[in-house]
């Protein structure tokens, strides 16, 4: 498909990519300051890494993380795109007609991706590592799970709604704006190479989550999201797909908490690797069908 370059303001995508990365680094610092002062305003206490692991501060942690995500991903995306075009909405491709079949296909693809991700996570664990490297990566994973443990505190359906907004909806929107709507979009426009832009973006998408054991699973997810965006030409398609993926994870955590089970005792730990192989074959079939649907102009 062809992506339009309308209402340009002068900056080329190659330069805008460097601007985007610089803005992301700046957003991390500014967002950190904003989250720091917001924390003090909300809690009346001085922020510390340990305070972010206090379950009684779950709501404050969610708000701080949401503010940080907005400054790291959403604000840099909008500024960088605005430097390229006068019409960010058109550039992001947010004004496309509603594609109900595309959203339906995305939902099925995300269901299959749960099995594929489980298989890739298991394959990653089979990669031999030195004792020091294994300890380092497991410590990283433990720190990540501690943060998830706090943010996913849910006692009732109201808590579930809040967590769905802060851990499913907001990340889906801001990350898709940054990775697919801006980074992949700009790289494709600059190089004309769709698959190069998808793969590079997916590697960055996975690396920025700082999880070795989830690296290949997130890379695969990024590739699928990038392909959905590239083929549909509609940023809402990967946003909805990403939201479905996140919402399934939140729903699983809610179920585990309701059942009194640890949140790391999830579905991915129980999926046999061969189920991921079957899901991969089905996923390829659905992707081909989606490709045909878009090529035929069927929405």
Image (cartoon, rainbow, N blue to C red):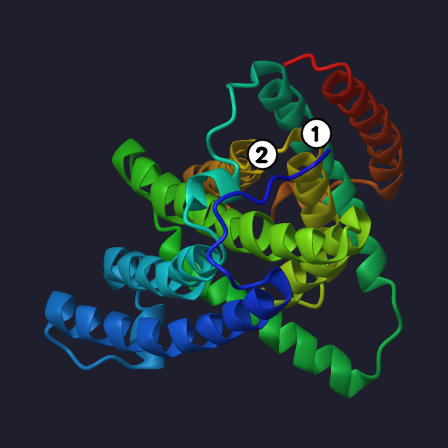
The quadrant of the image that shows the N terminus is: top right
Looking at the image, residue 9 sits to the left or right of residue 270; the answer is: left
Q: Exactly how many numbered labels are in the figure?
A: 2
Q: Are marks 1 and 2 in contact (CB under 8 Å)?
A: yes
Vertical placement of 216 versus 2: above or below?
A: below
Vertical placement of 122 versus 20: above or below?
A: above
Instruction: Tell me the crowding category of disc 2: few under 14, some 14 to 19, or many 20 or more residues within 10 angstroms, Cα based.
Output: many
Q: CA distance from mark 1 to mark 2?
A: 8 Å
In which image quadrant can residue 141 be found? bottom right
Near-viewer residue (153 or 217): 217
Residue shown at the point (11%, 70%) measured from the top left: 41
Vertical placement of 99 versus 48: above or below?
A: above
In this orientation, does residue 58 appear?
yes
Residue 98: horizontal and vertical position, in percent?
A: 51, 19
**Which disc is residue 109 wearing?**
1
**Which disc is residue 122 wearing?**
none
Residue shown at the point (53%, 47%) measured from the top left: 176
Q: Earlier in the sequence, mark 1 or mark 2?
A: 1
Question: Disc 2 marks which residue?
Answer: 241
In this orientation, does residue 214 appear?
no
Residue 160: horizontal and vertical position, in percent?
A: 34, 37
Residue shown at the point (26%, 35%) measured from the top left: 158
Question: At numbered mark 1, what does the secondary structure look like: helix, strand or loop?
Answer: helix
Residue shown at the point (39%, 71%) measured from the top left: 27
Looking at the image, residue 82 sits to the left or right of residue 101; the answer is: left
Near-viewer residue (284 or 58): 284
Vertical placement of 111 versus 48: above or below?
A: above
Looking at the image, residue 60 sits to the left or right of residue 163; the answer is: left
């Amino acid at each position: 498909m062809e992506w339009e370059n309308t209402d340009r303001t002068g900056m080329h995508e190659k330069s805008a990519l460097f601007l985007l990365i610089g803005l992301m680094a700046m957003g991390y610092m500014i967002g950190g300051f904003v989250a720091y002062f917001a924390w003090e305003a909300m809690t009346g206490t001085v922020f510390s890494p340990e305070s972010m692991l206090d379950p009684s501060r779950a709501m404050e942690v969610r708000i701080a993380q949401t503010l940080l995500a907005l400054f790291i991903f959403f604000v840099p995306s909008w500024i960088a795109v605005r430097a390229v075009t006068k019409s960010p909405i058109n550039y992001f491709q947010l004004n496309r007609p509603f594609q109900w079949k595309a959203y339906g296909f995305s939902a099925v693809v995300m269901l299959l991706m749960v099995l594929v991700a489980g298989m890739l996570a298991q394959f990653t664990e089979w990669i031999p590592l030195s004792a020091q490297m294994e300890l380092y990566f497991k410590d990283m994973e433990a720190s990540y799970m501690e943060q998830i443990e706090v943010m996913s505190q849910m006692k009732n359906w109201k808590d579930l709604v809040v967590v769905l907004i802060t851990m499913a909806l907001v990340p889906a929107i801001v990350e898709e704006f940054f990775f697919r709507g801006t980074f992949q979009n700009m790289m494709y426009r600059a190089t004309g190479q769709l698959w190069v832009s998808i793969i590079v973006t997916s590697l960055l998408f996975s690396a920025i989550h700082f999880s070795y054991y989830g690296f290949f699973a997130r890379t695969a997810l990024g590739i699928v999201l990038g392909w959905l965006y590239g083929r549909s030409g509609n940023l809402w398609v990967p946003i909805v797909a990403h939201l479905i993926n996140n919402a399934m994870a939140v729903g699983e955590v809610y179920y585990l908490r309701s059942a009194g089970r640890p949140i790391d005792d999830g579905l991915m730990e129980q999926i046999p690797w061969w189920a991921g192989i079957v899901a991969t074959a089905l996923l390829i079939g659905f992707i081909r069908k989606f490709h045909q649907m878009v090529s035929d102009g069927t929405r």
